[in-house]
Amino acid sequence: MDARPVVPRRARLAVALTFAANGSVFGSWAPRVPEIKAALGLSDGTLGLALLAPGAGSLLTLPLAGGIAARWGSGRTTRWALVAFFLSALPIAWAAAAGEGAAPLFGALLLFGATTGALDVLMNAQGITVEQSYRRSVLSSFHAVFSLGALGGTLVGSVAAAHQVPLLWQFVVLGMFWLVVVLPVSAGFLPDPPVPDDEPRPPVFAVPRGPLIPLAIAAFAVLLAEGATADWSAVLLRDSFGAGAAAAGAAFAAFSATMTLGRLVGDRVLTRLGRRRAVRLFAGFGAGGLTAGLIVAELTDGPVAIVAVVAGFMLLGAGISITFPALLAEAGVTGARAAPALAAVSSGGYSGFLVGPTVIGGLAELTSLRVAIWFVALTAVLPVVLVRARAVRAG
């Protein structure tokens, strides 16, 4: 007979739906980018600068969200952040409809990124609270639900674009739908574990300290690999290995598929192996898989090389699938307070996601993209080196 209480199950559903809502709205935006680029008459370079705004906005609020959750609780503040997240999507549609160039779009995306970053920290903090109530890993499944939500949102955005549905209506309908679904069940969010009275209040601005530093650097490496794969894998296949338009996206598709599948089964793996051991094994597997694929691609040509690159990114996706959720969960039990520790490690991770594509582009400019992509394989192995077998509790 299952002895787990009913309350954590309800909380788990509430957190899962919050992750799905976040992924859905975030994913629905991507298919509308080309039409916004055309409507505003933006060049590739100007659009690229505008698309840096969400990452920059996230980095502004990630370190602050941990202190907010520590003071008012991750459950309450997740509800606030969810509403703010949906509202912050609306100025994107207004900026696109105004047709006044890149500056309003940049400001709208900066605001959207700021609420996204805050929501990421807060919902992960509540996820760790739920995980601790279960006494086993559940955070990886939440990240899998985010990926599935993003996939569903991408489909919604694509259909809306095909039928010329105004972006404002797309965001309004999605936002209202998820608020109606999530807010009632969010009453099931759990209170965060009590903190001793003699413990000092957390800093307002969370930065990695002590044993959180290697976790933050490992998170930086993992999300650098994810960001670089998203932005450069198709270009690598098309320009460096001669893949056609249809095949160019195969590497990122394979990467995304194995990442989602890995996260769906990740909780069982993390429970069996332990977070730190699993991070080391999976990160090593992912880095080794990409390295093997790139080596085969260099030694061959034509379709064989293309298949090798796709297989390399597929193995990388499987390898890092559980790594970022595991690093966040480890931060939650390593730091003196879960939310500020999460914020500190998340800031490292999202810094990698933000700068990774730029680093690869700069290296490709100096050498070639075939050479620059090796930087992804090298950084992907960093969690193996940085994450020790045993944690040392901060504070």
Image: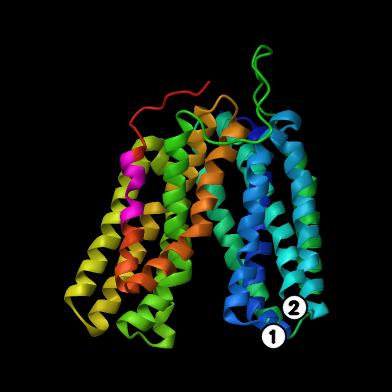
Rendering coords of residue 58 (x, y %): 64, 52
**Residue 288 in sight from this viewpoint:** yes
Q: Give the crowd class for mark 2: few <14, some 14-19, many >=20 residues within 10 Å.
A: some
Q: Answer with the quarter of the image where residue 10 lies.
A: top right
How many numbered marks, from 0 up? 2
Q: Give the crowd class for mark 1: few <14, some 14-19, many >=20 residues within 10 Å.
A: some
In the depicted view, which residue is nearer to us: 48 or 211?
48
Rendered residue at 58%/80% (across/down): 44
Q: Answer with the quarter of the image where residue 255 lies.
A: bottom left
Rendered residue at 26%/72% (across/down): 308
Q: Which residue is mark 2?
A: 101
- As drawn, the label of residue 41 is 1
In the depicted view, which residue is nearer to us: 70 or 24?
70
- How far is mark 2 from mark 1, CA to CA? 7 Å
- Magenta residue span: 378-385
Say if the magenta span includes residue 322. no
Q: Is residue 79 left or right of residue 313?
A: right
Q: Answer with the quarter of the image where residue 197 lies.
A: top right
Magenta-highlighted stretch: main secondary structure? helix
- Give amino acid for label 1: Gly
**Residue 253 in sight from this viewpoint:** no
- Give amino acid for label 2: Gly
Q: Is residue 79 left or right of residue 324?
A: right
